[in-house]
Amino acid sequence: EHTRGTKRVGPLLKLGALKHDKLGDSAGALQALEQAMAVDPTGDELRARYLAIAAELGAWVEASKTLERALATVKDPAVKAKLTGQLGEVLQRRGETKRATHLLSAVLAAPEAPAEAVLAAAHALRAIHEAEGDTQALCDALEWIVELEPDAAKRRDADERLAELAAKLGDSSRAIASYERLLSTDARARALEALVPLYEASAAPDKRARLLEEQSRDAADPTEARTLMMNAAELRERS
């Protein structure tokens, strides 16, 4: 019976695509895909297509109910994590930020959650915490984005925001780590400038030595560059 049921998903997915793409019937497409979700919600393509049309129609109430029903039937931990995150994002769109935060945070804590589900949840949590002004929680979400985001520009943006917030919180180790990662990006000049007081405040000679080495790389005058590198070498010798 289950096998026969799952065979209906393909035709329903095609029907939904036909109604949406060819006939311009978004409501009819959503209905067809909702039927497919009721049969087997485990397919990534199906859920993505369903949620895209729900977004187009603003059908967040219907989408949340569909995803809640799907969550009750799915047993695979990875798929459950994806569904949990998607439900959290839908609830965020509905303005139910407390429930959304709970679900999205559960995805971050789930060891079986796929990286793409964790990344999507982290981006959603970033938006929630930015809006609510929860700086510490925002830093945690940004850490996930920095770790998992494949897009270099988005990763740099997250690191810049993380470094700024960590510095304001007095979390110098986190700020230093973020600024150091930014040294290899086009935000290098700003990162190096921000690292100067952080490194100088550090009692660690290796940090002060690294500052001199980075300044040496940027020095236009070869003599100045050589002097900075020699000073860095002396610091490392004494450490």
Image (cartoon, rainbow, N blue to C red):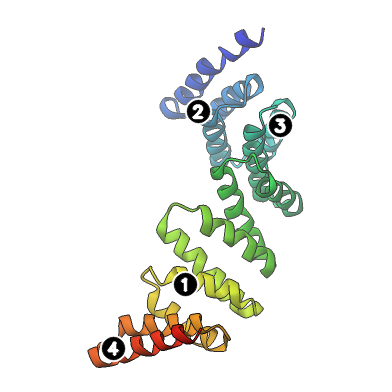
The CA distance from mark 1 to mark 3 is 41 Å
The CA distance from mark 2 to mark 4 is 69 Å
Looking at the image, residue 43 lies above or below residue 52: above
Q: Mark 3 points at which residue?
A: 71
Q: Name the residue under label 2.
A: 25
Tell me if mark 3 has few (under 14), some (14-19) or many (20+) residues whose alpha carbon lies within 10 angstroms of its own.
Answer: some
Q: Residue 81 carries which label?
A: none
Q: Which mark is residue 226?
A: 4
Q: Can you name the residue that lies furthest to the left here?
A: 222
Q: Is residue 105 at all visible to an observer of this figure? A: yes
Residue 74 drawn at (x, y percent): 69, 27
Mark 1 vs mark 3: give the one in front.
1
Q: Which amino acid does label 2 sit on?
A: Asp
Q: Mark 1 points at which residue?
A: 180
Residue 234 drawn at (x, y percent): 41, 88
Residue 182 drawn at (x, y percent): 44, 70
Q: What residue type is labelled 4?
A: Arg
